[in-house]
């Protein structure tokens, strides 16, 4: 199993544990995360979910090898996961050490509190891969950081440092590596003892307008993504990345 689960003191800890592939998330892992959130939503003893990656990297994003070999299986698993996390009623806290890329970063945008190491690095390199963002990432980044800042990072596929992410209001806080565990533990413990119904009701109020906008945009976003995903430049970008060469883009 490459998603580790541990429950204690009202906290469900979900850890991505796939170091041989830089914590890339395949369909089985997305399904495991989905199932864990579904069960947590039904279990009154779970007060808060803590999402973690590894000590050196949070996640390299979706498994690009599976994106090439079994795209429909991966796609279906991602759609299920993002629908569940979007509508999850309990608080989700994320702890980020190291790089967090692609769909893993989009996952963080759905977390309620995100605390990162000062060495963390974020990116959604969809344009570099010949694709567009998905699952509401563009909307949420533009809403938090403004269209100009979001455009710079998304259209240029530029990385985002921890300090930049904080300035762009994409994460909640930063700590050095020695202090991050303690900071996250204190926030998670606080959420676990606060009145659960009040916490969940407040989250509903905070996410209500966001989810309404996302639901309205889903069809258009998916149509744009599917069209671009089938393009020759998307195929070339993915092939070049997996083959370790520079892509060559031509007008179609």
Image (cartoon, rainbow, N blue to C red):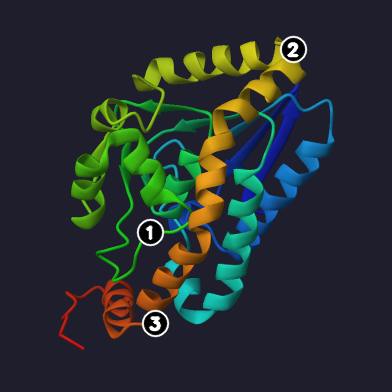
The image shows residue 83 at horizontal and vertical percentages of 63, 53
Q: Mark 1 or 3 closer to N-term?
A: 1
- Identify which residue is drawn at 59% across, 61% down: 79
Do the residues bearing badges 1 and 3 touch, measured as CB atoms within 8 Å?
A: no
Q: Which mark is residue 133?
A: 1
Q: Quadrant of the C terminus?
A: bottom left
Q: Is residue 138 above or below residue 244?
A: above
Mark-to-mark CA distance, 1 and 2: 36 Å
Give the left or right position of residue 41, taking residue 225 as reference.
right
Element type at marker 2? loop
Q: Is residue 23 above or below residue 246?
A: above
Mark-to-mark CA distance, 2 and 3: 48 Å
- Identify which residue is drawn at 60% across, 64% down: 27
Mark-to-mark CA distance, 1 and 3: 14 Å
Q: Mark 1 or 2 closer to N-term?
A: 1
Q: Mark 2 or 3 closer to N-term?
A: 2
The image shows residue 236 at horizontal and vertical percentages of 27, 81
Which sits in the foreground, 4 or 73?
A: 73
How packed mark 1 is, by other alpha carbons closer than 10 Å (few <14, some 14-19, many 20 or more), is many
Residue holding disc 3: 230
Which sits in the foreground, 132 or 234?
A: 132
Residue holding disc 2: 195
């Amino acid at each position: 199993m490459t998603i580790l689960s541990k429950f204690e003191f009202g906290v469900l800890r979900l850890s991505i544990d796939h170091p041989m592939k830089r914590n890339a998330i395949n369909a089985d892992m997305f399904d495991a995360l989905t199932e864990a959130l579904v069960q947590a939503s039904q279990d009154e003893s779970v007060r808060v979910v803590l999402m973690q990656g590894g000590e050196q990297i949070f996640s390299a994003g979706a498994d690009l090898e599976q994106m090439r070999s079994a795209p429909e299986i991966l796609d279906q698993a991602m759609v299920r996961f993002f629908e569940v996390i979007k509508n999850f009623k309990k608080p989700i806290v994320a702890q980020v050490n190291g790089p967090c890329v692609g769909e893993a970063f989009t996952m963080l945008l759905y977390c309620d509190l995100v605390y990162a190491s000062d060495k963390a690095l974020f990116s959604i390199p969809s344009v570099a891969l010949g694709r567009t963002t998905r699952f509401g990432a563009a909307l949420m980044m533009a809403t938090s950081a403004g269209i100009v800042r979001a455009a710079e990072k998304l259209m240029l596929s530029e990385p985002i440092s921890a300090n930049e992410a904080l300035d762009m209001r994409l994460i909640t806080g930063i700590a050095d590596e020695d202090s991050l565990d303690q900071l996250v533990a204190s926030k998670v413990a606080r959420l676990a003892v606060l009145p659960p119904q009040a916490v969940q009701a407040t989250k509903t109020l905070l996410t209500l307008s966001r989810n309404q906008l996302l639901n309205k945009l889903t069809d258009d976003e998916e149509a744009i993504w599917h069209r671009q995903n089938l393009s020759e430049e998307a195929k070339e970008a993915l092939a070049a990345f997996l083959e370790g060469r520079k892509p060559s883009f031509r007008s179609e």
